[in-house]
Image: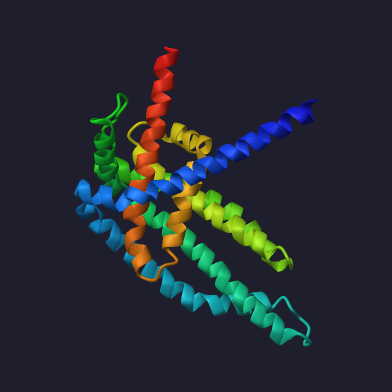
Amino acid sequence: YIATVSFPLERSKDRIMIKNIISALTAYAGSFGLITKLKLWKYFIIPIIISVVTATIIGFTAYGLSDNIGVFIAKIWIWDWGKETFTTITSVLGAIIVLVIGLILYKHIVLAFSAPFMSPVSEKIETHINGGLIHNHRKTSFQEQLVRGIRINVRNLTKELLITLPILLLKFIPGVNIISTILLFLVQAYYAGFGNMDYTLERHLNYKDSINFVKKNKGYSIGNGIVFMLCLLIPVVGIIIVLPLSVTATTVKTVELLNKDNEIYYQNV
């Protein structure tokens, strides 16, 4: 009986997750128009500079380290036969490891240090949607926003690395590469969306409640993060447009979710 009940419940959760991911993806459609309408482009100048500088530093570092990591991994192959083939494989694997870790570091550095500049953007979008800020709005300073951004992203960075490293090991198993690649992408997307959602959540929820909020709405986080990660695949332009688009899109959805939670709260009072 328990099995027959739990299976439909799991399917229902999966459908809701997919629906929420699609909803977060569609939120990007009006991002450019909303940014222009609310005259928000000026707020993105410093975050774009942070994004470009961070990407450049990590990019050059990754380029220099990829071969070294490949050679280091190749040392585990102690036999002469197949040495050259194994070295080639480990060089590719080394490049993948550096790329993945580089993207993780880039993402969290940019999300953390952009927090004080993205909070005003989120606030203006919320005011536009609601005609004002909802009742439990908290006023925070530039320093508090920066500290909150660093705290959230250090926490997320640690967790993401702990999840990512075992997934990278799956690439040694033939036939599992595709699955591991999809898992890596979804994990990266989730934490990218997480950071974007917190620009709005920091005004309304404390640290612990924000984490629980994102966990409850992980579909929206993943959906937002999918486009965030895809933007980074666009040479040069990607690191410029990624924050304006993703922050605007996720703010719209996060405000909608907060409004919904407040409606439920007042109905139950």
Residue 45 position (above or below residue 75): above
**Residue at 55% from the left image edge and 52% from the top image edge:** 187
Kindly indicate the quadrant of the structure image that contains residue 242: bottom left
User: Which quarter of the rendering shows the C terminus?
Assistant: top left
User: Which quarter of the rendering shows the N terminus?
Assistant: top right
**Residue at 77% from the left image edge and 30% from the top image edge:** 4
Residue 84 position (above or below residue 155): below
Residue 211: where, in percent of width, then height? 48, 37
**Residue at 56% from the left image edge and 79% from the top image edge:** 67
Residue 106: where, in percent of width, then height? 42, 61
Question: Is 132 placed left or right of 81 in the picture?
Answer: left
Residue 221: where, in percent of width, then height? 47, 45
Q: Is residue 205 visible?
A: no
Give the total number of marks visible in the rendering. 0
View extreme (top): residue: 269
Question: Is 6 placed left or right of 55 in the picture?
Answer: right
Residue 66 position (above or below residue 234): below
**Residue at 39% from the left image edge and 22% from the top image edge:** 263
Q: Is residue 22 visible?
A: yes
Residue 54: where, in percent of width, then height? 36, 64
Coloring basis for residues: rainbow
